[in-house]
Amino acid sequence: MFLGLSSWLYTCACVLSACYPEQ
């Protein structure tokens, strides 16, 4: 369960970094 949450957070971070490459 925790691994699933971590995976979702990691995916969210990748999407945010793609939307805001400057940060």
Image (cartoon, grey):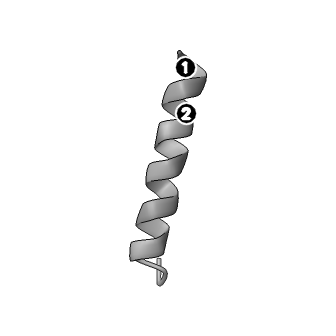
Q: Position of residue 22 (x, y in %)?
A: 47, 84
In this view, which residue lies farthest toward the top? 1
Q: CA distance from mark 1 to mark 2?
A: 6 Å
Q: Is residue 12 above or below residue 20?
A: above
**Residue at horizontal 55 percent and vertical 33 percent from the top:** 6
Q: Which mark is residue 13?
A: none
Task: Report which residue position mark 2 lands on.
Answer: 6
Q: With respect to residue 3, does 19 lie above or below?
A: below
User: Measured from the top left, where is residue 1 in percent x and y?
Assistant: 53, 15
Label 2 packing within 10 angstroms: few (<14), some (14-19), many (20+): few
18 to 9, vertically: above or below = below
Q: Between residue 5 and residue 22, name the one nearer to us.
A: 5
Q: Position of residue 7 (x, y in %)?
A: 56, 37
Which residue, given by chain and number where applicable, does mark 1 sit on? 2
- Element type at mark 2: helix
User: Total marks drawn?
Assistant: 2
Name the amino acid type tagged 1.
Phe
Q: Secondary structure at mark 1?
A: helix
Looking at the image, which residue is at 44% across and 51% down?
Answer: 12
Residue furthest right as drawn: 3
Badge 1 crowding class, 10 Å Cα cut-off, few under 14, some 14 to 19, many 20 or more, is: few
Which residue does the image show at 51% across and 50% down from the upper left? Answer: 11
Identity of the residue drawn at 47% across and 77% down: 23
Q: Are marks 1 and 2 in contact (CB under 8 Å)?
A: yes
- Give amino acid for label 2: Ser
Residue 20, quarter of the rendered image: bottom left
Position in image of residue 4 (x %, y %): 54, 26
The vertical placement of 1 against 3, above or below, is: above
